[in-house]
Amino acid sequence: MEDYVSSEEEDYYSDRDSLEGLENEEEDDLQWRPKAAPSSSSKVITKESLLIAQREDLRRVMDLLTLREQHARTLLIHYRWDVEKLLAVLVEKGKDWLFAEAGVTVVERKDPPSLPSTSTVLCCICMDDVLAKETTTMDCGHGFCNNCWTEHFIVKINEGQSRRIRCMAHKCNAICDEAIIRNLVSARHPDLAERFERFLLESYIEDNKMVKWCPSVPHCGNAIRVEGDKFCEVECTCGLQFCFSCSAEAHSPCSCLMWELWTKKCQDESETVNWITVNTKPCPKCHKPVEKNGGCNLVSCICGQAFCWLCGGATGRDHTWSSISGHSCGRYKEDHEKRAERAKRDLYRYMHYHNRYKAHTDSFKLETKLKETIQNKISISESKESTLKDFSWVTNGLNRLFRSRRVLSYSYPFAYYMFGDDLFKDEMSKEEREIKQHLFEDQQQQLESNVEKLSKFIEEPFDEYTEEKIMEVRMQVINLSVITDNLCKKMYECIENDLLGSLQLAIHNIAPYRSKGVERASELSVCWNTKANDTDSCILSDTSINVLTGSEFEDK
């Protein structure tokens, strides 16, 4: 379900006077008072800012360990660009272990004595005598002819191993110097050298657990970097909102596993099979499913076979009001009845949750069309000669309605798995499950009731009302907006503390609830000290996002 509300348009603090009618509310619970907007904890990385973001981490490691850029990059790629983890390993196991594990060789080697330009050396790969000036020695001390090195690099780049190309020497785990790779490959295949550069650059995204490509289709070319918890929902500058953990659509309060199972269940034919099991019987001759369309228990398949609806056994066509001639099936078959009853119960349970999920999803889509209607009503109201000029309470209430409706919609798939047997059968006793289910459903019903009330008042034709009537609607919208926000918070507290938080055998994380909606990622701005002078340089990526698409991603 898409979220049609951009967080840039949402301002819950403009209507300061809207709280005059609220009483007995804790000041901390009201999200309507002016306060500084918090800085975004997620950043959009474009083609221009990708290099900047990568250099920021490289600079930290280079300065800390006094390394060259290539060695710092090798360490970061090995530790998936997790600087904190790299530093933890450094403290725990020491620099030597850190370097050896990542394949970094940092040794002070004396330059070999200069040889005459006409002297030759034996290459141990091709076993040819080549000029000394046509050989290259890596940091690990192994040297081979440039032709062998080049062929080695080309093969590895084509195999997709650009980020960690190892030395050709037997049992040597040292990572080759990226500058040497670049120079040798570009002399023969400039296009391949460019691909190598792009692979190194994109490793910051591909190998970084805190950075992911935006899953938009067609791809917008952006990546998102989060700071802190990866279990969150973000909005790219292209407008797409998604779960950072699984890259699916934003689905909180469902966990990623719950949402994966739910979407699969809704898309495949498992419920169709359940319906067939509950409402049809297989023909004993052709085995096709047959649905009964009358009251008589002697049914006939299109193949011509007559059979008993009660037991499914083949019969003749002769029957009386009370029995089928020559047939009796009064004996109870427990297993068959249990299976049919279980399938019927599972189908009804799924239909209960799916119907409500679908109903709120449809309501959400219909309510998004109110946006233009609301703007027209506001324009008409503002054009009137009236003392009421601030109608931000309407747009604030509409945005609150969108968010609350979205939470309510996804709460049904959550409840389906939380209180079913698919995931948590062994986590709770039957009595404990019933208690927790009643607790959750009470909160769910309260939220549902107030969301419907808020929807009703939002759709009021306030542009036709008197000032007194508008003030009444205004206070109802403001009150219900605060109430639904608080109910959403309490539902999430119940989920995180009483339901998911009490699990012992499984861990399910959900994105936290945010009163202001899914966080919109901000443009990445990275600053560092340049070597040319001591002044700080700060580069802000361009806000025009139209990069890293098409052919630039054919190798991604």
Image (tube, helix red, strand yellow):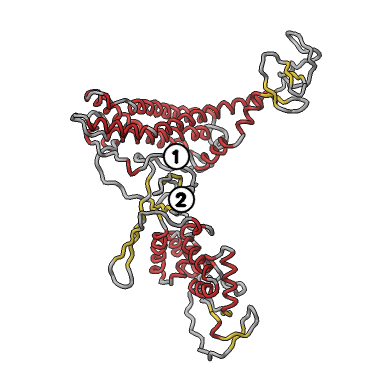
Pinpoint residue 216: horizontal percent, then vertical percent: 47, 48
Residue 123, picture quadrant: bottom right
Residue at image x 32%, y 67%? Answer: 529
Residue 476, picture quadrant: top left
Determine whether 304 is above or below 521 in the image: above
Residue type for callout 2:
Cys
* 309 with respect to 222 (left or right): right
Residue at the far right in the pictured view? 326
Circles 2 and 1: CB atoms closer than 8 Å: no
Q: Which residue is mark 2?
A: 214
Q: Residues within 10 Å of mark 2 (few under 14, many from 20)?
A: many
Q: Is residue 100 visible?
A: no
Mark 2 or 1 closer to N-term?
1
Q: CA distance from mark 2 to mark 1?
A: 15 Å
Residue at image x 67%, y 19%? Answer: 292
Q: Which mark is residue 359?
A: none
Q: Is residue 313 visible?
A: yes
Secondary structure beneath dot 2 equals loop
Residue type for callout 1:
Glu
Residue 426, picture quadrant: top right
Looking at this view, is 415 or 350 the one in front? 350
Pinpoint residue 139: horizontal percent, then vertical percent: 51, 76
Pinpoint residue 448: horizontal percent, then vertical percent: 41, 28
Determine whether 146 is above or below 501 in the image: below
Q: Which residue is mark 1?
A: 2
Pinpoint residue 33: horizontal percent, then vertical percent: 25, 39
Determine whether 310 is above or below 398 in the image: above
